[in-house]
Image (cartoon, helix red, strand yellow):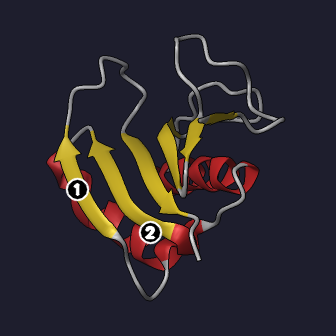
Amino acid sequence: MQTIHPDHFPVPVVPLSHGVRAGDLLFVSGQVATDADGNVFVGDFEAEVNSAIDNVEAVLEAGGASLADVVKVGAYLSNAALFPRFNEVYARRIGNVPPARTTVVVDFGHPDVRVEVEAIAHLGK
């Protein structure tokens, strides 16, 4: 098992790894929208979704993968009304062969977090 931490990411303040590679699988922990300093980004919802996916992509790249290798996504939204807007951005980013996905509405316990995205990538040939 190998932990993955992109060089430009701040050290997590909670006990987790940004990603973990286990065999041919790379598990990316939930990523939220962040600014350059690692603080929660608040703004346009489309920008928040893109930032969360950018962060997933950074962990994937640090682990030797890309969005094309993702086989499963977990998406978490703070409000069901955000689902259509999330889908629009997600569809543009994820490509023509979308992975399996679960999307749920949750209470993040943080007033500024509206979206979180996690992923599992397959690195085998």
The residue labelled by disc 1 is 102
x and y percent of residue 63 in the render? Answer: 69, 50
* Residue in the foreground of this view, choosing between 28 and 106: 28
Q: Where residue 94 sits in the image (x, y, percent)? A: 48, 73
Residue 70 percent across, percent down from the top left: 48, 66
Left or right of 108, for residue 17: right
Note whether 35 is above or below 85 in the view shown.
above
Amino acid residing under circle 1: Thr
Going by the picture, which residue comes out furthest to the bottom? Answer: 96
Q: Is residue 117 above or below residue 93?
A: above
Say which of marks 1 and 2 sits in front: 1
Camera-side residue: 40 or 69? 69
- Which label's residue is closer to the chain start, 1 or 2? 2
Quadrant assignment, res 86: bottom left
Circle 1/circle 2 CB separation < 8 Å: no
Cα separation between marks 1 and 2? 16 Å
Label 2, residues with CA under 10 Å away: few <14, some 14-19, many ≥20: some
Q: What is the quadrant of residue 18 in the picture?
A: top right
Asked whether, in this view, residue 72 is left or right of residue 41, the answer is left
Q: Residue at x 44, y 54 (%)?
A: 120
Badge 2 marks a residue whose secondary structure is helix
Residue under numbered circle 2: 89
Q: Quadrant of the N terminus?
A: top right
Q: Residue at x 42, y 68 (%)?
A: 90
Looking at the rendered image, the quarter that the C terminus falls into is bottom right
Kind of residue at disc 2: Val
Q: What kind of element bears circle 1?
A: strand
Q: Is residue 75 left or right of residue 96?
A: left
* Residue at 74%, 32% in the rendered image: 9
